[in-house]
Amino acid sequence: MNKVLLVEDDPRVASFITRGLEENLYEVKTITKGFDAIKEVMENEYSIIILDIMLPDITGFEVCEVLRSRKIIVPILILSALDTPHEKVKGLQSGADDYLAKPFLFEELLARINAQLRRTEFSNGILDFQSYAGVEINMKEQSASRDGKELNLSSRELKLLIFFMKNREKALSRISIAQAVWNIDFETTSNTVDVYINYLRNKIDKNFPTPLIHTIKGTGYMLKNKES
């Protein structure tokens, strides 16, 4: 059974979401404060976090930032009455994977939760992607290394590397990368994917004799050891 952590201080909203999720066979734990949510996530495993922004102690943005800084990569879905483009961008930049504005249809919330769980299946116990060309991913510690050297990746960079490792030696489009790592259909004018590829390259390829991330002209990128 998938476990959901619901961080919501409005009892009516919390009751509505909990009832709907439990009817769909989810296990739900509700917490009303941001600091309590951080402590709970550090001590227990959850499949997904549903997070309100306006909490009694700290904001949901701050909760996201703290969890990502501690290498917690469980999917975070922000659910908030703050629905301006600026707030949505802020939420995603703080580390959230999705953002749904209130009021909402429960069916849409459920669909978004299920989509996030599908996207994260590659980080739940799959072993064959964790080692390739000297790169090792430690899912328990949420860390990665190459030839024994710690790469010190951010949570987003780690998700990007996991996606590459799972799809190694395949040409990946910028759109497929954006959908898998950010759950967003980036416009073709956005350079967000390219920026994060550059971040990852600086850690995984710099100071190593053989580059692993390659640009595929007209397509996107590929993780491949061309010396193998």
Image (cartoon, grey):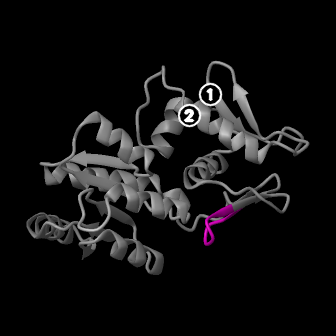
Q: CA distance from mark 1 to mark 2?
A: 10 Å
Give x and y (percent) for residue 166. Answer: 62, 51
Q: Where, by quadrant of the figure, is residue 117 drawn? A: bottom left
Magenta highlight range: 137-143
Mark 2 lies on residue: 193
Report the residue that reaches farthest toward the left: 12
Q: Are marks 1 and 2 in contact (CB under 8 Å)?
A: yes
Could you classify mark 1 by the number of other residues whose Cα lies within 10 Å: few (under 14), some (14-19), or many (20 or more)? Answer: some
Give x and y (percent) for residue 59. Answer: 31, 59
Q: Nearer the viewer, mark 1 or mark 2?
A: 2
Query: Would you place residue 138 above or below residue 211 in this image?
Result: below
The earlier-in-sequence mark between 1 and 2 is: 2
Give x and y (percent) for residue 225. Answer: 82, 42
Mark 1 lies on residue: 220
185 within the magenta span: no
Which of the two residues, 36 or 161, is positioned nearer the viewer here?
A: 36
Element type at marker 1?
A: strand
Report the residue that reaches farthest toward the front: 57
Q: Is residue 1 visible?
A: no
Type of amino acid under label 2: Val
Query: Would you place residue 42 above or below residue 65 in this image?
Result: below
Type of amino acid under label 1: Gly
Q: Where, by quadrant of the figure, is residue 125 drawn? A: bottom right
